[in-house]
Amino acid sequence: MSEKILIIDDDLDTLRLVGLMLQRQGYQISAATNGQQGLDKAFDEDPDLILLDIMMPDMDGYEVTRRLRSNPSTTETPILMFTAKTQMNDKVIGFEVGANDYLTKPTHPSELQARVKALLARASEKKGARTAREDGNGFLIGVVSARGGLGATTVALNLASGLHTRTKSEVVLAETIPGRGALALELGLTASHGLADLLSQTRLTDITRDAVRGALMHHASGIKVLLASDRPRDMHLISQSANYEALASKLGGLARFTLLDLGAGLQPFTQVILPHCDEVIILLEGNPNTIINTKALIEDLHSFGVNTSNIHPVLNNRIRSDTQLPTSQVQAKLGHEIITTLTPAPELFVQATRMQTPAVLCQPDSLTTRQFNKLVDFIVEREAMPR
């Protein structure tokens, strides 16, 4: 174990005691007694993790975190805020400015060690997944919702089709929940056992790029699809987290854009995959309960190592109702920017299902297609940004 941990704290006793404890666990320790010194060391030494106090005289930990996140060299460095500030509001601010975890003093050494170990493990997995994309060009997008019935599959399908139409490049759409496949029926495809076959592999070395490519189905829209079966008995494969991670690393290198239909909630495999996604789209609708659920989901994603700037809520109002809140109110209650709003178009989606094609191709000039094109433009712009 040779990971380097930078401790930034103006309390010399904390530096000495915590530093010694972590050193005994095999970590390399670097220390700074104020915010500016901590920033200088972070930029010069490239630590694997930063243990950061909040209450410091010259520059508090919140400002240190903001500056770390604005610098390309430390934008993804794990930050564990370790502080005596115990109020919930303090913790919320910590996550909002970019902290990955928050722990209050005093704490038992074993808890601190466990938090440090978990953050380092997630950072290592994320780095490994990115490295494993063989061609290095894939852009991985996760589509998820806090609760069911919010249209994750429909949005993922139409976004995939829109990206293919706009960029004329290869696009892969992958279902991820075995036993609950929907795309085969939606698109008129057969052989919906591709995902189940890959998750059933007992050796990770068998999940090769060629094996994943061979499991993809081609659709007339131009996209390639990894199908999940609709057999409920396959649901047990959802526990194969290691297979999921190997699969995600291979999918990320097969096309310019790969979309993962992650369904609802945070399954064990989504907690493994989501931190490796370049962007995460979260679907919600304009009612108070869903907004509360979505806000909690965003907070959980923070704790799993997903950068706030990579989380993008999309308001998907699928039902015409006066009870739906307008976008401005949803955004204010959520505390996160809504990147686009999809308005109800039930007749269009019924027609698309009958034609077994994405809705954006069924009526290319419709309002719905224009709304999806706004999301397409956003993703293309994000892909062009330095990573």
Image (spheres, rainbow, N blue to C red):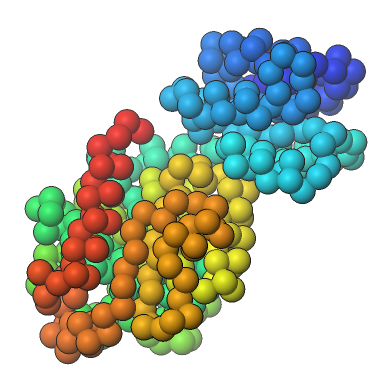
Residue in view at x 24 percent, y 63 percent: 371
Instruction: Please say whether residue 95 is visible from this viewpoint.
Output: yes
Query: Does the image show residue 216?
Result: no
Q: Is residue 99 left or right of residue 183?
A: right
Q: Position of residue 43 (x, y in %)?
A: 53, 15
378 versus 124 height, above or below: below
Q: Is residue 92 above or below residue 5?
A: below
The quadrant in which residue 204 appears is bottom left
Placement of 165 over or under 79, stated as above or below: below
Q: Which quadrant holds residue 56? A: top right
Q: Position of residue 116 (x, y in %)?
A: 71, 36
- Tell me where residue 22 appears, x and y as whole percent: 78, 26
Considering depth in this image, is 49 or 117 the residue closer to the camera? Answer: 49
At 43% from the left and 82% from the top, the residue drawn is 322
Q: Quadrant of the C terminus?
A: top left
- Residue at (76% x, 12% y) in the render: 33
